[in-house]
Structures are given as structure tokens and as C-alpha cells.
Amino acid sequence: MTEANGQPRIKRDVNELALLFDISRLLDQSLDIREVAEELLEAMSQRMGVSHATLTLLNRQTGEIYIEAAHGLTPAQRERGRYRPGEGVTGRVIQTGRPAVVPRISKEPLFMDKTGVRRGITREEISFICVPIRIGNESIGALSVDHLFTERVSFEEDVRLLSIIASMIAQAVRLRLSVEEERQRLMDENVRLHQQLQDRFRPSNIIGNSAAMQIVYDQIAQVCKSNATVLIRGESGTGKELVAHAIHYNSLRNNKAFIKVNCAALPETILESELFGHEKGAFTGAVTQKPGRFELAHGGTLFLDEIGDFSPASQIKLLRILQEREFERVGGMETIKTDVRVIAATSRKLEEMVSREEFRQDLYYRLNVFPIHLPPLRERKTDILQLANYFVEKYAAVNHKPIRRISTPAIDMLMAYHWPGNVRELENCIERAVLVSNDEVIHGHHLPPTLQTAEASGTVHTGGLQETLDNMERELILDALKSARGNMAKAARALNISERLMGLRVKKHDIDAKRFKARHL
């Protein structure tokens, strides 16, 4: 039996079966069609005798149709083959979901030949066949081939065969999507569970996921619902007031007042008046009666910052309030009852002060009911970048500056510094860096001199122009590698240099590109 084109039907059937077997074998090799697309099109070219074969896909995010793989096209020609749904024959096929046959491309005005591969063909005409790749009712791409035109060709068989191949590709894509969705679901579940473990209790006003801060969060969760007195210990600038806020706003007193007093900022006479209030005429200038902070905080929380600076006389009065929950205003005789939860904080070593008799031992025990130690920033290095990013966003918004990122050398400097001023010092450094940045990036030279390292500042050796150029080159290479996730070839393209030159420069500056590669769980 012979077909209209003169090819024996048996031979064509054998070729079709061989082609479908080859394609099935290729699709079994990988869940990702992109990994075997080139071999698949090569097999189609050999078995079907076509001059060109193309796999185009639809980008759902951009709405653009692009060539994923092609047989007989150069990389430049592939790049030119971009369409919108409905544009040209391929765009129309993807938009309508129906196959299209163009017997002679020179007679079809819709045929655009954006790739330019058919230009210059004058003696021979080209037939173009394109079928959609569909998942359900949605077209995700198209499969197309070129034939040399002849009057005896029957296109129905080619459309049928291409439709079968397109269906096999769609099944492979559907399977890959199902596997990816399941993998993503498991990853999301893993992240959710991991986050639940990390955020068993995490106050919204405190930033940090380090192990040291997780201990602090657990302690806040344990004490916040009680009325116990809390003593927050830690160096200056670690965020003791934030912890006090977190305890109050997660407590049963959160609808009452939160009053704070900085004990180190006020002289003894004024401090007593501020805490306990005074009667009219109690001292010069007391022209009216004034309620103290203990009265104002009734039913709520009173935060006493820098409690170690209390004078001996004030310590006695504070001890009485903690024991008896009552006090008198300065110059007054009336005893006032108060229901106040006291949270105290200090950066001083109270135990040493007690041993030197600078702080009352009985008051120390009254305050130290539930101690919380805030770690210094140098002991929670993993939180530095998270804090820095938060402050960049905060001060970029306040100062209306579009800061997009922190450069790698600047990050290295932030991580290497010992931060004696803790989080407060980090915040001030980032605020300054945001103000002086003029290219949407926080660079190393935007940070204060105290943070500058010898490597980042280029001061390891004294020198002139060459040393300065070397330092600048190193910073550019580090930034490129960071953006490329450690991919040397991609970083080289970003810097417009060859891969060989990139390798030489990385070796020259002793850069470990592997540390920029993405880490996977």
C-alpha cells in the first residue's frame, strides 16, 4: 500500500513507532522536558525528515512565547523567535489551542519568520505545521516542523503524529508539575514547622532568630502572663526596653499603662518626685500636687531603666513599694496603695555593687525574681544581617532613599566588627550609611572608620594607584559572584570579561566562589 506522497505506508508506520519509542525513552530519562528537548527534536528530524523542528513555551508571568529548544536554528535565531499570544502562526496556535498548517509560507501573511531561518530560500517552498501542547484546557506551548513543499504531501498524518508527540510532552510536563507541587508543598510544610519551632513565642517588636534570642523569647513567654517582678540584664544598647515592652504587651495588663523611667538621667531629688509624686508646697517650685509614675502606672507596668543608679535613699523607698505595695508622695502624709508590676533593667553588675555595699542586698533579691539576660550583639552574629536589613528598610523609607542592598564587602565588615555599642550602634551605623549612599547600595566605604577592616579599606599595605585599583576590582568581583550565587561564568558575563580572566582574577584575590553558592535544605 502506498500513500499519496509515494512513501510506503508500512515504512511510515515503522518510522512512527520508532520515533514514538525514542521520545518515550527520552521522556523517561528526566522529569524536566527542557533537559531532553534537544534530543527529542533531533529524533523528530531524523525520523520525519523535517528540516527544522521547534519547541516553544509560554511564560505565564510575562505572557511571552519563547523558543525553548530547536533543531536547525542557531542560538541567535532562537533568541529572535519571541511572540505574544495571537501573534503569528505560532502565537495563534497557542492562543486558540488548535493546530495550523501552512502549505506554503510565502502565501501566508500570518507567517512572520522572526527567526529569519527561512530567508533566502527562493527555489524551494517551505510547509509549516504547528500543533499546541495542552494541559487540560490551557495551551502551555507549541510543537512545529518545516517540510519542503510538494504537491503530493498529505498533512493530516503529520498533524496526527505531531499531536501525539505534543500529548506525550504535555503528560511529562503535567507529571513534572505534580512532582514540583508536591516537593514545594513538603518544603513549605518543612519551613512552616521549622518556623513554628523557632517562633514558639517571638515578640513582634524584637528582631533575631539566633539560639541566644530563642532563649530570651522562651523566658518572655514564661513570665509575661504573671505579675512577677522581672530584672533584665545586659549591656547598653542590647534592647532591654524592647523586652520590657514585649512582656507588658503580652501580659494581662496590656490594656493598662506602660510607664518608663530612666533612673540614670534624673538627679535623686527629681527622681523621687517623678516616681512617687509630690504635694503642693513640698519644695520650691511645687506649685501644684503632682501624681508620680507609680500612680500613673496603677494597674499596668512600670519600667525602671538603669536601676543600678538608684541612690541608697531611693533604694529604701523602692524596697518598701515592692514589699508593701504602698508609698507616700514627697511632702505628703497619705499612704497610697498601688497595683503595679515592676520591670527593672540594668547594664551594671549588681552582684559586685552588693558586695561593695553600693546596692542593697534585700532590694537585689526583690528585683531578681525572674532574671532575663540579653546577649550582646557579638554573641548573636547570625542576627546582624537581619537587623541590618531591617534598619536599611526603616531609614530608607524615612529618608526617601531607594536603597536596594548591602554590598558583600560591607556585610563582611558588619560581621567582623565586635559591636561594643550593640544593636544601638548598629542602627546608628546603618542610618548614617543610608544617608551617605548615592547609588542604591550600602558599600563598605559608607560605614564608619571604626568598622573598616584592613582588607576592605585597602590599608593592608601602603601603596598608590595599583593597590586602590586592586581593592576596587576585588569588591566588584565579590559583588558579581554574590549576584550570580557563585556561578563564575555568569559573574564573568556580568562584568563583561572572559571566564578565563575571571578565574585568574579570583585566584589573584584569593576569593572562594563556593561560599556564594545557594544552600539547600
Image (cartoon, rainbow, N blue to C red):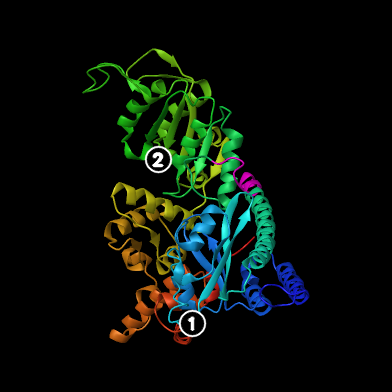
- x, y (%) of residue 251? 54, 29
Q: Amino acid at mark 2?
A: Asp
Residue found at x 48% / y 82%? 510
110 lies left or right of 134: left
Q: Which amino acid lies under the numbered mark 1 shown in the image of this protein?
A: Asp
Between discs 2 and 1, the one toward the N terminus: 2
Q: Is residue 318 visible?
A: yes
Q: Which mark is residue 384?
A: none
> Image point 25% across, 22% down: which residue?
283
Q: Which residue is mark 2?
A: 309
The main secondary structure of the magenta stretch is: helix
Q: Which residues are magenta?
A: 192-202
> Looking at the image, which residue is at 55% across and 48% down?
213
- Compared to residue 505, the image places residue 414 above or below, namely above
Count neighbours of disc 1 (C-alpha within 10 A) and say few if under 14, some if 14 to 19, many if 20 or more.
few
The N terminus, quarter of image:
bottom right
Mark sitting on residue 510: 1
Whole-angstrom CA distance, mark 2 to mark 1, is 51 Å
Nearest the camera: 193 or 145? 145
Residues 197 and 384: in front is: 197
Nearest to the eye among marks 2 and 1: give it: 1
